[in-house]
Amino acid sequence: MLFSSSFVSAAFMMLSSVTALPQPENGALSGRATGPCAAGSYLYNATTCAFCPVGSYCDGTSGQAQQCDSGHYQPSINSTSCLATVPGYYQNAKGANNTIPCPVGSYQPYGAQAFCYGAPKGRFQNMTGQATVCGTCCGWAAPLQNNNINPVNCSGTTPNAWPSSGDGCTAANTTCVRAATCIQLANGTCPAETIRG
């Protein structure tokens, strides 16, 4: 009787140690491994396949989960590839499960990118997540080298400016028709520009 009691205690301890093993991040096991793990899963231990975690892909060739590269992301488990960021968004980290909108003062016209461009002189962007940058209007300037958010209405001793030129406000006359406002619309549409004469 003592033997069987010891045997039961030992068996219970073995079961306890099995359940104490670390589990995959997502807590989802895809099944017992009898060969290579299927695409969308990876070899968690010698006998178990687990669903590929978010921020990673499992193509079924290496048996391992691979982190998504910068410029890419994966919000779902059990994935065989990563998604590319779309224009207006970026991701600068590896293993990401989301994208980041370009902040005000910046833009990104391409997908699969790890950064956003700062709006240069003569250009501005006052909205997040934009793929384009706006040009300034006649009589308005965006004087910063990078990250211009809103154009400045030229006045005082330098009341003029060419549109989108990057020259900033000037005292010299311009032949373009001065714009009363230079506002980007709520849907991201840029203001009308007058081409430099």
Image (cartoon, grey):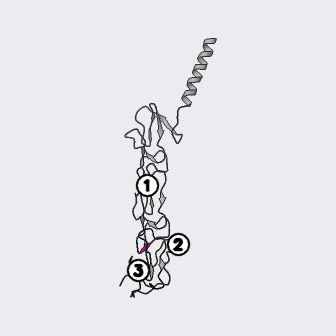
Q: Mark 1 points at which residue?
A: 92
Q: Where is residue 51 in the image (x, y as percent from the top left)?
A: 48, 41
| First to last magenta residue range | 122-128
Q: Nearer the viewer's eye, disc 1 or disc 2?
A: 1
Q: Which of the 4 image quadrants contains residue 14?
A: top right
Circle 1 SS class: loop
Residue at the limit of the structure toward the right, as seen here: 1
Up/down of 194 relative to 87, above or below: below
Up/down of 170 relative to 130, above or below: below
Circle 3 SS class: loop
Which residue is rendered at x = 63% and y = 12% of the image? 2
Q: Please name the amino acid that badge 1 sits on.
A: Asn
Would residue 124 be counted in the magenta stretch?
yes
Q: Please name the amino acid that badge 2 sits on.
A: Ala
Q: Which of marks 1 and 2 is nearer the N terminus?
A: 1
Q: Position of residue 118 (x, y in %)?
A: 42, 66
Q: Which of marks 2 and 3 is nearer the N terminus?
A: 3
Marks 3 and 1 sit apart, C-alpha to C-alpha, by: 33 Å
Q: Name the residue under label 2.
A: 186
Q: Please name the amino acid that badge 3 sits on.
A: Pro
